[in-house]
Image (tube, helix red, strand yellow):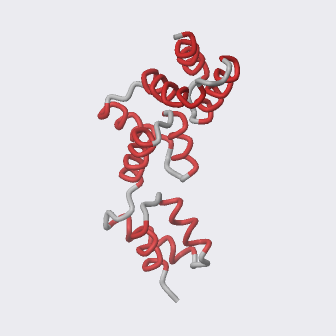
Amino acid sequence: MQTAYSHALDALSRRARSTVELQRWLKEREHDPAEIELAIERLTASGLLDDARYAMSFARSRLLDRKLSKRRVLGELSRRGVARGVAAEAVNAVMEEEGIDEEAGVALVAARKYRSLAKLDPQTAYRRLVGFLARRGYDGDVVRRAVSRLIKA
């Protein structure tokens, strides 16, 4: 049977995880809580487990690749056990570094999605587009403005 530390190393070699995610993962594999805590401390001390670095990487991929909203990314990081302050700092840093403007981002995502909805009547296209953007976590007012501008154009 593997130790919690070696099991954690295997898990981290496959993909990055937050501290809480790794703790949950090890607990599911029925490792002793004291052994889990020692493994977490050792990984953190060696720099292999770093929630701030994980949050930056996660935020960058979700904001740039998946075009998710700031609110949605913060929610996903929270569900993964990253502290609210660490998550907010990471998301804000990525948005600043990459020059991400949420209004422009929602307009871009809306325009891409609208191409597949253009054959529908305007009311149906509006409804589907607003729903699509809302599920990505964008603010309702921002979504409605962007979609109204797009469909009127």
Relative to 24, say whether 134 is above or below.
Answer: above
What residue is shown at x 46% (from left), y 71% (from top)? 11
- Looking at this view, is 105 or 89 the one in front? 105
Q: In the figure, residue 145 lies in which quadrant?
A: top right
Q: Is residue 81 left or right of residue 39?
A: right
Q: x, y percentage for residue 7?
A: 47, 78
Q: What residue is drawn where x is 37% and y is 33%? A: 95
Front position in the image: 111 or 133: 111
What residue lies at 50% left-to-right and 33% top-to-bottom? 69
Between 63 and 52, the one lying in front of the other is 63
Asked if residue 102 lies left or right of residue 127, the reply is left
Which residue is painted at 46% across and 21% down in the image?
103
The percent position of residue 125, horizontal first and vertical second, equals 65, 23
The percent position of residue 9, horizontal first and vertical second, equals 41, 74
Residue 61 at x, y percent in the picture: 41, 46
Is 61 drawn above or below residue 132 in the view shown?
below
Dividing the picture into quarters, in which one does residue 140 lie? top right
- Residue most extreme to the top: 152
Q: How many marks?
A: 0
Decide if residue 135 is on the left or right side of residue 16: right
For the view shown, which residue lies furthest in the front direction? 119
